[in-house]
Image (cartoon, rainbow, N blue to C red):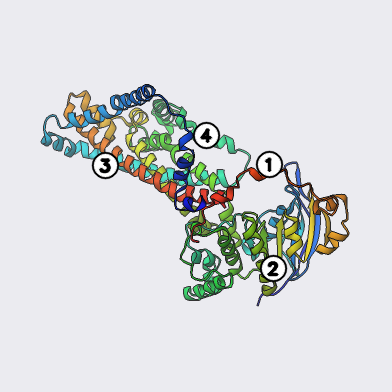
Amino acid sequence: MLSVIPIRLSNIHKKFGNFVASENVSLDIRPGELLALLGPSGSGKTTLLRVIAGLETQDNGSVFFGEEDMTNIGPKDRRVGFVFQHYALFKHMNILQNVAFGLQVRKKRLGLSNAQIKERVLELLDLVQLGGIERRLPSQLSGGQRQRVALARALAVEPKVLLLDEPFGALDAKVRRELRRWLRIFHQQMAITTVFVTHDQDEAMEIADRIVIMNHGRIEQIGTPQEIYKHPASDFVSEFIGTGNPPAPLPAYLDAVPKIKEYEVEAGR
Amino acid sequence: MSQAVLSETPTKLLTKEFGRVVHRDPLWARVLLIGTAALFVVLLVLVPVIFVFAEALSKGASVFWQAINDRDAVAAFKLTAYTSAVAVALNLLFGLAASWAITKFSFRWKSFLITLIDLPFSVSPVISGLVFVLLFGAQGWMGPWLQAHEIKIIFAWPSILLATIFVTFPFIARELMPVMEAQGHEEEEAAVTLGASGWQIFWHVTLPNIRWALFYAVILCSARAIGEFGAVSVVSGHIRGETNTAPLHVELLYNEYATAAAFSIAAMLTLFALASLVLKAMAERWITTDAYSDFIFRSKT
């Protein structure tokens, strides 16, 4: 069983050149919750996620996992599960090798045998409903399958926190809806503190326990979906969430544009 | 529509979809263009290659055989082989390190380093050979010191190696940089969050992703190293059986009117060049199946 821990960010400041990606952001993430970082592109949500993972070093501020100060600990030793937007699967390794990677590289330290690793990986693949395809390469999977492989790979190392960067961004609408419902249920079973980044209001509203709305490197509002929907804290929030005027319908000519996804090659299906 | 498309490769799909609308030039224009290109290839590439083999065998196979088994010729082949092997190995190390540094990190002198890597491309090999003579030669900058310590660089193997390394310096880094650039750092970042160390990332993630590009670069670099004439000619001293590389040996024999022997050595070098061309073409195909097919998948999902 994974121990469920809170994450605390205090005064995280990060600049890229002159661009302030995160302006003294402080945030308490509760143990076991599913938290969405929601905002338009360039609002600093991905930067914040990468700071939690240690992939980005903040100029100022500190990161705590539970009581542990992670500020000076590199991404290698933070024990985070990170799911990348384009999954970043190792394309020359099959699914089994991909999911086993995190255990394989620390095999000696963990005192695991190859058989034990394989057993754990197959268990995980069953958990994400990908049993039986462990010998395939990432290029032979559909987008949704790749996404679940990335999730299984991140969970294999028994991370303390799970971080997902635009987890459904690269999927088409139908698969996206299925997967986010699935992730919601999956998260409840796993009981692991989870943060995901999205620019899609519906997505955040549907599955998150709490939503953090970001704009220009700052937090505009933190709250449950209901709180944010009913009591937006600023004009930006109400506009972004769409509680003000409903968005104008798309002009009709856009329907005539052929959709790219019709050409999608869905290998292995 | 989508059902029919599923089984097709993306390239086929493109030709099928857009093939009809492509503008076709009139017959005479096509004949003229293709004819001109073919004429140049035949005159400048095919005829000389055939000529090399024809001349090599003009006095019969036994003369050819004798020429390539001659003591000095064998010494020249060996020298060329050693020199190229060491030069390629060192450039491999350097090229990997440089392209890793340039594509995975950002630092202040990056564009300066890239320019420096390209420098051997823009300097004439003869000039670069002369630079080494001016540096290490008897009258050169470090000459007196080297003589005092009885270290021989010019007109000896070290200078041949230095000249070869200098001339082939950009090949591997230049070949790897675009490939590593295109791949980005996501897989490496994924590996580090999974607890992999720097070496583990390099061996298990980075290297497998660039293996065919690396293979391709090594072939190009070897071909250039083996064929290098200008820079080596200036620094080698042309001592038969000692500091004479294979390309220099061709010149030496030719100047002695041993035409058939000269062309026999040249034929051996040409054979190697042809073999490396075949390998290069194969590597190109593997690179395509490796990196770009994944790129196509990525952009479509």
Chain ID of residue with mark 2:
A
Amino acid type of disc 1?
Tyr
Query: Is the residue marked by circle 4 packed among few (<14), some (14-19), or many (20+) residues within 10 Å?
Result: few
Instruction: State which mark lies toward you, 4 or 2.
Output: 2
Residue B248 place in picture, x, y as percent: 28, 30
Mark nearer the N terminus (1 vs 2): 2
Instruction: State the residue position of label 4.
Output: B116
Amino acid type of disc 4?
Leu
Instruction: Give the residue furthest to the bottom.
Output: A1
Instruction: State which mark lies toward you, 1 or 3.
Output: 1
| Callout 4 secondary element | helix
Q: Decide: is A88 above or below B153.
A: below
Residue B165 place in picture, x, y as percent: 41, 38
Foreground of the two, B123 or A248: A248
Between marks 4 and 2, how big is the CA–CA gap? 53 Å
Amino acid type of disc 2?
Arg
Between marks 2 and 3, how big is the CA–CA gap? 67 Å
Instruction: State the residue position of label 1.
Output: A253
Amino acid type of disc 3?
Lys
Chain ID of residue with mark 1:
A
Circles 4 and 1 on the same chain: no
| Callout 3 secondary element | helix
Instruction: State which mark lies toward you, 2 or 3.
Output: 2
Residue B78 — which label?
Answer: 3
Between marks 4 and 1, how big is the CA–CA gap? 53 Å
